[in-house]
Image (spheres, rainbow, N blue to C red):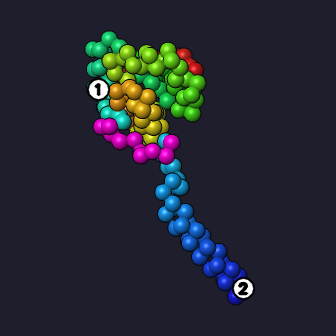
Amino acid sequence: MRELVRDAALVLGAVLILGTAANLVPTRHLAWWGKGHEPPMAGTDFKLIDAGSANSIRTTLPRVVFLDTRSAAEFAGGHVPGAQPISYTELQTQLTADRMAQLRAADAVVIYGASEETDIEQLLAQELHGRGLAPPFVLLGGVLAWEGAGLPLGQGGGR
């Protein structure tokens, strides 16, 4: 039993020492967000928008693009009218030159997901902003807030 306690203490000590040393090396910090950059920041990488305001810009501006980050099945079950599906994990293939040109020409870009959790939407907004777009909007509450506000849903489609 004594040997087991001693071995556990040695392993714990080694982990603490090596972990501390690894974090002291500037280039070795773990990338918790995106590509190891700062986390997306509201007001810099994206702007938050509520469902009513998002619908107002959808109906008043001529070129508004809505990007839906949900699965193809969720998208087919109902989405913001005119929305385009996009997958954060497949950005390299989905952000073609033509699509980037369309997003650059848009009066506004609104990104939404399934619910109040907007981590993926914020990362997507940061990526788009990093590629030269004006900070996109992230819809607060996602499609649930859109539905909850009694706003129309389009049907069908998919990736």
Q: Tag on residue 71?
A: none
Q: Residue at x 29, y 20 (%)?
A: 57
Mark 2 lies on residue: 3
Question: Residue 72, located in which quarter of the rendered image?
Answer: top right
Pointer 2 local density, CA inside 10 Å: few below 14, some 14–19, many at least 20: few
Q: How many marks?
A: 2
Q: Position of residue 50 (x, y in %)?
A: 31, 31
Q: CA distance from mark 2 to mark 1?
A: 65 Å
Q: Which residues are magenta?
A: 35-44
Magenta part mainly helix, strand or loop? loop
The amino acid type of the residue labelled 1 equals Gly
Pointer 1 local density, CA inside 10 Å: few below 14, some 14–19, many at least 20: some
- Label 1 residue SS: helix
Going from N to C along the chain, the mark reached first, 2 or 1, is 2
Q: Is residue 13 above or below residue 95?
A: below
Q: Position of residue 91 (x, y in %)?
A: 54, 29
Q: Which sits in the foreground, 79 or 33?
A: 33
The amino acid type of the residue labelled 2 equals Glu
Question: Residue 87, located in which quarter of the rendered image?
Answer: top right
- Label 2 residue SS: helix
Q: Residue at x 72, y 85 (%)?
A: 3
**Horizontally, is 136 left or right of 2 in the view?**
left
Mark 1 lies on residue: 52
Q: Residue at x 61, y 73 (%)?
A: 14
Q: Residue at x 32, y 18 (%)?
A: 107
Q: Which sits in the foreground, 112 or 131?
A: 131
